[in-house]
Amino acid sequence: MKNLVLVPTDFSEVCDNAIHHAAQAAKFLNYKIMLLHVIDKNTREYLKKEDKGEAHIQTKLQEKADEIKARESLEVETKSVPGDIFTTIGEVAQNEGANLVFLGTHGKEGMQKLTGSYALKVITSSPSPVIVVQKRAFEKGFKEIVLPITNEAGPWEKTKWAVFMAKEFDATIHVYQIGGASKAVQDAAQRIASYLEKNSVQHTLEIAGKDENFTKQVIDYSTAHSADMIMIMTNPDSTFKRFLLGSYDEDIIFNASQIPVMCINPRKLNYEILGM
């Protein structure tokens, strides 16, 4: 890791908002930023329509970088590479040692359609946590973070990241356990709360009422608590080389309240790193 925040952009308004989020987060973290554009078939179609060469993309990236440097006094790098957004963003994150990726998602107005299943493919290909941003502005930082707990098998990686984010942003972690859970899930939520306490992290632990739609409960709870972020984890296959997002995850990622969502692909190495 190189204390780097990676931000893919197709120069749309929502990607500009992701860049703004990333810049503000980088100031908290004392990280630098890298703006990335993947030159794919959509880019080439755009360049052909505008009668421009690929150098035009690097010029646009540099203009954006200069703007951020002047406004935020941050170190900003740029990179444009040919490839496919579904795999190249993850490869660049890996090769550049990015700690975090900020991904702006939108409808059809952007050059590369970073929405729906396209965005999900980008998320599941990333070795680094991806913070998904819609059009909601960055306000006071990530001060209120919701950590939903639905099972006992996979919350440890995101708990480690919850501690990191809490300490860096002086945040409160709201552990929100699914209602009607098994004893194993209840025990996991209690261990997480104990771990947060051990690490001097401000936190709460609440249990949702019994309801078939936990997704809606999470979003309603997050909205009611003015959450600045929701943290979720993908589901790995047995090899930890492929990661899956279900309808529950997708509904949270594209929530109507436009709360940023931090998506974490678990690494096998870290499943026992917390010593829980």
Image (tube, rainbow, N blue to C red):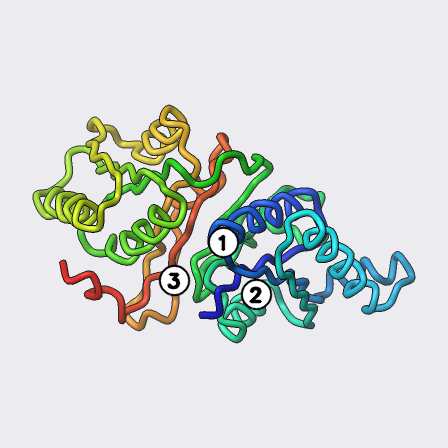
Is 17 left, or right, of 133 in this rendering?
Answer: right
The residue depicted at 45 percent of the width and 60 percent of the height is: 124
Amino acid at circle 2: Ile
What residue did someone put label 3 on? 243
The residues bearing labels 2 and 3 have C-alpha atoms spaced at a distance of: 15 Å
Seen at 78% across and 56% down, the residue is: 63
Q: Nearer the viewer, residue 121 or 272?
A: 272
Name the secondary structure under disc 2. Answer: helix
Q: Is residue 49 left or right of residue 118?
A: right
Q: Nearer the viewer, residue 156 or 109?
A: 156
Residue sitting farthest toward the front: 73
Residue 51 in which image quadrant = bottom right
Q: Nearer the viewer, mark 2 or mark 1?
A: 2
Going by the numbered disc 1, the residue's amino acid type is Leu
The amino acid on which the numbered mark 3 sits, given as a three-letter code, is Phe
Secondary structure beneath label 1: helix
Q: Residue at x 38, y 56 (%)?
A: 264
Disc 1: which residue: 120
Q: Which mark is residue 91?
A: none
Q: Is residue 169 left or right of residue 274?
A: right
* C-alpha span from label 1 to label 3: 10 Å
Q: Residue at x 62, y 50 (%)?
A: 19
Quarter holding the C terminus is: bottom left
Marks 2 and 1, the one that precedes in the sequence = 2
Q: Position of residue 28 (x, y in %)?
A: 48, 49
The residue labelled by disc 2 is 89
Q: Label 2: few (<14), some or many (≥20) within 10 Å?
A: many
